[in-house]
C-alpha cells in the first residue's frame, strides 16, 4: 500500500490546541472524502462529455487516510492511499482538480462570489464543516494564500447550494410540553417559546418523559438536547434529524439562567435597572462553562441594577457573592461568615484563567470547611 | 415599633431564582440614597403591602420577605420611621457605610429573611 500527501488543512480554535482533534470532527472529513470523489467524477465527465459514466475502477484503488496531526493548533495531513504501487495517473489528475475545486469554492464563498461548483456538489458542505463551532475554522493552502472554512463561510456555501434547508449541530436547552410514546415523537420548547419536533428513542426516553411529566408544574425540568437539527434559509430551526445526547439539566444551569436574564429590558427594577447586554451575557456564559470548576456547587445568578450579574452561593455559615462587571470583565468576590462575621474579599479578573482559578480555589476552601464542620452521620 | 416588629420588603422578580432571593434585595441601589424602603409590619399585612406596592405603575414584586427591627439593630443599621409617602413607610439607613460594608450587612439581613421564609408570594 502506498500513499501520497494530498491535503494539509489547518484547524484553528480552542478545541484544537496541542495538536488534538475531537473524534466527532472526523465525520466532517469523512464527508469531505465523499465530496472529493463526486467532484472528481464531475471533472471526469466535464473532460469526457461523450461518456455518461465514470470508469468502473475510478475510485476503487484510492482512499483518503489521516496520516498525521502536527502542532500549529492542529495541522492534519490527509494522504491518498493506493492499493497499487502507483495510482492510475489519469484518475489522480481528477482528484487533484477536485481538491482545487473544493478549496476554490471555499475561497469564493469567503469573498462573496459564486463558486464554480454546481449546487448539488456544494450541498456536501451540509456535512463538511458542520462540526465547526463559532470561532473555529479549517484553512487550506492555495498558491501561497489561504481559503478558510468557518461557520459563516459554510452558511454562504449552503446559500449557493440553493437548498431550502440544511443541517446544523445544535445543543438546545428545552422543556418538553409533549411526548407521545405511541407515535415515537416528542416536542421541545425553547425559552423563547419556539417549538421543535424530535423522535423518541429508547436511549433517552426516560429523560424526555421525566421532563414531560414536570412540564408546567412549577417544577419545570429542562433538558439539553444535542444532535443534528434542520435549519432553513431564514435561520429558523426545524426538526431534529438525529439526537445524540439528552441530558437533564441542573435547575441552576448557568446558560439557562443567563438566557432568562437576556430577556430583561431596561427599567426592569421598578422603572430603574439597566438590562445586561446580550453579547456580554453570552461571553460570561461561555467563560463560566469553560472555567468554573464542575465539582463546585453552581451559584444562583441575578441581574444587578447596573447591568451586571451577581452570582451567589449559600454554603452553611457562609454567604458568598461574586459581583460581575460585564464591561470590565472583573468580579468582586465577598464571602461573609454570618455566624462569626469573618469576611474574605477578592478582586478577580475574569478574562483570564488565573482569576477563575482563584475563584474556584476560594469556593473549594469554603466547601471543604463545610464538610469538616458537618457532624458525622455514623 | 418594637424589636420584633417585622419590616416588610418587596422583592423584585428579577431578584429571585428558584424561590431564593439575592442579597441585593436587602441593600439600597445607588439611586436610593442609601435608604432601603420597608413597610412597618405592625401596621400593614404582607399581602396588603404587596397589593399596594404592585398597584403603582412600573412596580413589580415576586412577594414579601421581612427582617425585624432587632436584626437591623444587630447590624448597626438604624431604622427611620419616616412615614412618607404613606404612614407604614420606614427606611433602613445604610448611610455612611462603605460599599463592602453595605454588601456584608445586606447578606446578613438576607440570611435572616430567608430563614423566616416568604411571608407572601405573588402566586398565593
Image: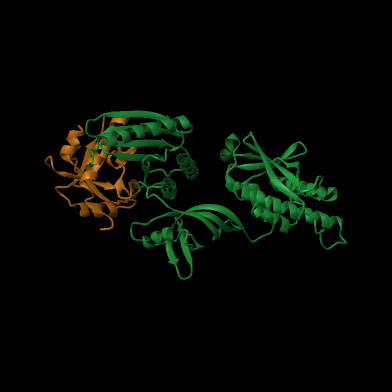
**Where does the image place residue B16, in percent across and percent down from the top left?**
32, 48
Quick one: which chain is green?
A
Looking at the picture, does residue B101 appear above or below residue A309? above
Q: How many marks?
A: 0
Q: Position of residue A36 (x, y in %)?
A: 73, 51
Q: Determine which quarter of the picture holds residue A238.
A: bottom right
Against B32, residue A174 (above or below) is below
Residue A314 at least partly seen: yes
Residue B85: quarter of image: top left
For residue A45, what is the image quadrant?
A: bottom right
At horizontal 42% and vertical 50% (from top left) the residue drawn is: A260
- Residue A281 image position (x, y, % from top left): 46, 43
Residue B100's spot in the image, x, y percent? 31, 30
**Residue placed most toward the observer, B96 or A250:** A250
User: In the picture, which quadrant includes the N terminus of chain B?
Assistant: top left
In this rendering, would A336 be left or right of A110?
A: left
Q: Is residue B38 visible?
A: no
Which quadrant, please, contains the C terminus of chain B? bottom left
The residue at the far left in this view is B2
Please indicate whether residue A313 sits to the left or right of residue A111 in the image: left
Q: In the image shown, does B55 or A56 lie closer to the viewer?
A: A56
Identify by letter the chain in orange: B
For this orientation, the residue located farthest to the right is: A50
Image coloring type: by chain
Residue positioned 37% across, 36% down in the render: A322
Give the camera-side residue of A89 and A187. A89
| Residue visible at 44% across and 65% down in the picture | A179
Amino acid at each position: 500500500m502506498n500513499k501520497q500527501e494530498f491535503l494539509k488543512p489547518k484547524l484553528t480554535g480552542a478545541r484544537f490546541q496541542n495538536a488534538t482533534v475531537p473524534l466527532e470532527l472526523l465525520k466532517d472529513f469523512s464527508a469531505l472524502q465523499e465530496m472529493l470523489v463526486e467532484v472528481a467524477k464531475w471533472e471526469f465527465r466535464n473532460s469526457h462529455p461523450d461518456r455518461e459514466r465514470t470508469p468502473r475502477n475510478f475510485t476503487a484503488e484510492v482512499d483518503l487516510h489521516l496520516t498525521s496531526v502536527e502542532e500549529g493548533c492542529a495541522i492534519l495531513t490527509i494522504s491518498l492511499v493506493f492499493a497499487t504501487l502507483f495510482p492510475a495517473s489519469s484518475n489522480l489528475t481528477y482528484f487533484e482538480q477536485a481538491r482545487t475545486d473544493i478549496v476554490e469554492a471555499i475561497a469564493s464563498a469567503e469573498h462573496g462570489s459564486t463558486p464554480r461548483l454546481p449546487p448539488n456538489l456544494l450541498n456536501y458542505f451540509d456535512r463538511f464543516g458542520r462540526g465547526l463551532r463559532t470561532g473555529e475554522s479549517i484553512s487550506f493552502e492555495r498558491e501561497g494564500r489561504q481559503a478558510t472554512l468557518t461557520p459563516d463561510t459554510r452558511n454562504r456555501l449552503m446559500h449557493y447550494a440553493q437548498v431550502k434547508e440544511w443541517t446544523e449541530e445544535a445543543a438546545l436547552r428545552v422543556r418538553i410540553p409533549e411526548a407521545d410514546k405511541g407515535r415515537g415523537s416528542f416536542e421541545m420548547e425553547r425559552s423563547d417559546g419556539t417549538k421543535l419536533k424530535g423522535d423518541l428513542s429508547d436511549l433517552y426516553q426516560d429523560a424526555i418523559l421525566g421532563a414531560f411529566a414536570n412540564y408546567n408544574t412549577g417544577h419545570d425540568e429542562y433538558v439539553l438536547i444535542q444532535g443534528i437539527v434542520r435549519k432553513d434559509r431564514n435561520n429558523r430551526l426545524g426538526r431534529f434529524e438525529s439526537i445524540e445526547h439528552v441530558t437533564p439539566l441542573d435547575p441552576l444551569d448557568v446558560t439557562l439562567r443567563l438566557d432568562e436574564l437576556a430577556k430583561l429590558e431596561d427599567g426592569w427594577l421598578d422603572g430603574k435597572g439597566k438590562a445586561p447586554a446580550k453579547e456580554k451575557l453570552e461571553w460570561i456564559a461561555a467563560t463560566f462553562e469553560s472555567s468554573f470548576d464542575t465539582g463546585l456547587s453552581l451559584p444562583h445568578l441575578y441581574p444587578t441594577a447596573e447591568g451586571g450579574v451577581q452570582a451567589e452561593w449559600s454554603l452553611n455559615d457562609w454567604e458568598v457573592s461574586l459581583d460581575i462587571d460585564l464591561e470590565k470583565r472583573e468580579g468582586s468576590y465577598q464571602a461573609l461568615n454570618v455566624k462569626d462575621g469573618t469576611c474574605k474579599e477578592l478582586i478577580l479578573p475574569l478574562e483570564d484563567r488565573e482569576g477563575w482559578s482563584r475563584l474556584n480555589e476560594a469556593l473549594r476552601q469554603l466547601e471543604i470547611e463545610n464538610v469538616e464542620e458537618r457532624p458525622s452521620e455514623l | 415599633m418594637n424589636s420584633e416588629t417585622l419590616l416588610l420588603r418587596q422583592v423584585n422578580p428579577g431578584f429571585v431564582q428558584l424561590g431564593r432571593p439575592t442579597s441585593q434585595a436587602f441593600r439600597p441601589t445607588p439611586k436610593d440614597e442609601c435608604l432601603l424602603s420597608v413597610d412597618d409590619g405592625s401596621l400593614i399585612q404582607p399581602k396588603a403591602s404587596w397589593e399596594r406596592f404592585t398597584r403603582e405603575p412600573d412596580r413589580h414584586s415576586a412577594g414579601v420577605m421581612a427582617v425585624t427591627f432587632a436584626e437591623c439593630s444587630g447590624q448597626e443599621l438604624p431604622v427611620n420611621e419616616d412615614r412618607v409617602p404613606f404612614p407604614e413607610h420606614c427606611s433602613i439607613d445604610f448611610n455612611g457605610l462603605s460599599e463592602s460594608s453595605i454588601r456584608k450587612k445586606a447578606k446578613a439581613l438576607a440570611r435572616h429573611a430567608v430563614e423566616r421564609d416568604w411571608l407572601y408570594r405573588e402566586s398565593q
